[in-house]
Amino acid sequence: MELYLDEGKQLNPKCSTLILPALSIGNVGQLAVDLLIPSLKADKIGCLDDPNLLPCVGNDAYSPSPLGKLALPLEAYESSSSDLTLVQQRSPVIKGMTVEYAKNMANFASANGKKHVVILSSLDFGRWRNINMSSGLQIYYLSSSNVDGTDSQCESLGWNRMQDYDPAQRTWKHLDALAEEGSMPDEDFPVEELGDEDYYPSLPFAALFSCFKAKGLKVTCLLCYCSEGDNIPEAFSMADAASRLTGLSGNEFQGPMVLKTGSCPSRGRACMDPQQIRVYFKAALDCIEKEEVAFA
């Protein structure tokens, strides 16, 4: 994976937290990053080139009226005021290359001084057990802070650890083995015999989680359950969760308030009603219309 910086741009060493999506059902992670980038007034610093991504190109993703600025499969942004680096992924990984892509991303993060990686993704609503909608949309997490995936900060924010995470389960162990530098695929692993218990570790977020963890980085996955369709509310909730985890103030991110009230929370802020938001996300949705979940 190579980083090609835009003219006059440099990586800020103070931006030690990386936020990025993992492709999954409903594209919630990508939509949340698309919300965070303009909310934080993050500057595009360049693009990343990885051979494991399908090539794609689109028009400007951040203006209701496209300005003719190209959007590429993997772009890097920085918000110096928030000490955050954000990576947006707009095309799926080539089938069978998920772990290789995750390794390359982990190498990039480690080589460029990232200390904490926040992965935003979604899970199939049809697999949600113990459903409780009394408190609205729920955020789940998975963290490298402890072996069992728990994290005290996430718990204090009112989130529950992802259901059914078991680091001793065969597919999670297989992923951890693949994530190690110089590892080779286990030819005896029964890829064709994966069951329901293998669903979560077969998703892209799991490969990223294992590879970042193998590099010694702190990694937190923020997850929500959703279905295909209009997932704008889930995207706002996910972006809000990422802002809370990284300690952003209400002045830096007020997206959920805009969605609920349809009015400006502060003078001078661009506000959008739900229909305008759909226009805002159109370019991103066009680029990520179809996705492939592949386990390597």
Image (tube, rainbow, N blue to C red):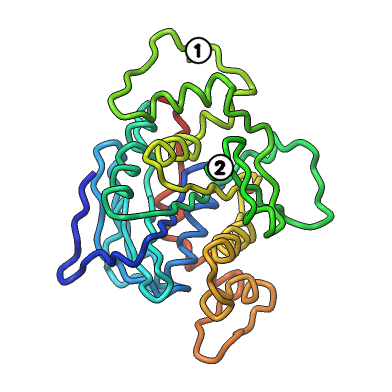
Residue at the image point whose x is 61% and y is 49% from the top: 229
The amino acid pointed to by label 2 is: Ile
Query: x, y percentage for residue 261?
Result: 69, 78
Residue at the image point whose x is 80% and y is 57% from the top: 135
Instruction: Give SS at disc 2.
Output: helix
Where on the picture, by quarter, is residue 100?
Answer: top left
- In the image, is 123 to the left or to the right of 285? right
Instruction: Give SS at disc 1.
Output: helix
Question: Circle 1: is it few (<14), some (14-19), or many (20+) Cα within 10 Å?
Answer: few
Query: x, y percentage for residue 55?
Result: 28, 43
Please tell me the numbered disc located at residue 192. 1
The amino acid pointed to by label 1 is: Glu
Query: x, y percentage for residue 267?
Result: 54, 91
User: Dots 2 and 1: beta carbons under 8 Å?
Assistant: no
Q: Which of the two discs, 2 and 1, labels the residue nearer the N terminus?
A: 2
Furthest residue in direction right, as rendered: 134
Q: CA distance from mark 2 to mark 1?
A: 22 Å
